[in-house]
Image (spheres, rainbow, N blue to C red):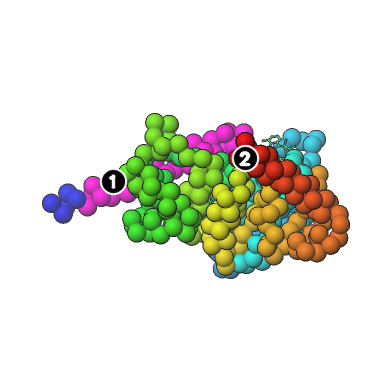
Amino acid sequence: MIQLYQPLNFMGMVYREIKQAIIDIEKMFDVLERNPEVKDLPGAKPLAVSTGSVRFEDVRFAYEPDRAILKGLSFEVPAGKTVAIVGPSGAGKSTISRLLFRLYDVSSGRILIDGQDIKTVTQASLRSAIGMVPQDTVLFNDTIRYNIRYGRWDASNEEVEEAARLAQIDGFIRMSPQGYETQVGERGLKLSGGEKQRVAIARTVLKAPPILVLDEATSALDSHTEHEIQGALERVSRNRTSLVIAHRLSTIVGADEIIVLDQGRIAERGTHARLLGAGGLYASMWNRQREAEEARERLAQVDDDG
Ligand code: ATP
């Protein structure tokens, strides 16, 4: 029996690995298809992560030859710290996260992780060192447990539930018809943008990568959801090198450094307090968002009263 079981067990493992690979390929298909030039160099070595520091050195990038998107970008995310990138729509913020994940190669300059140029290491090792919480999380037509375990297939049920608790989605799951066995997706339970993002955070908790990249959803969230996601993120990013691509400035007030990107260049950088004091682009973005939020809350109040 054992003799029969072991190969089956092995095949199960292989099956899961292939399935994960297929899912990853599906997600990146679009990008890879346009990008056959992103390849492992001959003899590429796995990335050796020591502390997990990230460094952009004079990075330039264009999707199309004559339209520069990043025009010489240098910054560092020291090990265990949080750096936030903010700026107007189209400034190139999400492009930074795509380059770090090496979905595209830089046109010039370098991106280093613990001193190693990401172009010289294997893509598989690079991607396993980075936890991505994307703008839109893909959920599979399977149970919510499966969807969280996608972060690490060999996680135990207890670990899945612990990750859900950390991501502040455990309460929601327990209230669902069949708890962790509830089907989600097209024919199952539909999750809101904020709930999906918390599933992505739970996956990342399971994966426990040394580097975290959060690409915040552009859509406005109600303040309760935002607060929950904020709490979840603070827990996951604690002591982990984190790069946050932020659309809502309220979520990055506590970042160690905020980089304000404008038309592919760093326009300002500093802490929230320093940037507000400087009265520049960040301060005017902050004031505009505050006014918009106050107007939204007044409208919500009118709705509630009416
Ligand atoms: P937002 O706040 O609206 O998400 P962003 O600062 O994250 O914007 P990016 O997504 O980095 O901006 O895009 C920067 C610029 O690159 C935009 O002008 C966008 O149109 C362009 N761009 C993005 N992806 C591609 C692509 N695959 N091919 C060509 N141009 C692209």
Residue with the mark numbered 2: 305
Does the magenta-highlighted stretch encompass residue 163?
A: no
Q: Position of residue 155 (x, y in %)?
A: 37, 56
At mark 2, the secondary structure is helix
Residue at the spot 47% in from the left edge and 48% down from the top edge: 199
Which region is colored magenta?
6-34
Could you tell me which residue is drawn at 68 percent across and 49 percent down?
A: 248
Q: How many residues crowd around disc 2 within 10 Å: few (fewer than 14), some, or many (20 or more)?
A: few
Q: Residue at x 38, y 59 (%)?
A: 159
Which of the pair 1/88 is nearer the observer? 88
* Dominant SS type (magenta): helix
Quadrant holding ligand 1? Answer: top right
Q: Nearer the viewer, mark 2 or mark 1?
A: 2
For residue 228, which numbered disc appears in the image? Answer: none
Magenta stretch encompasses residue 24: yes
Distance from the alpha carbon under mark 2 to that under mark 1: 60 Å
Disc 1 designates what residue? 11
The percent coordinates of residue 219 (x first, y second) are 63, 40
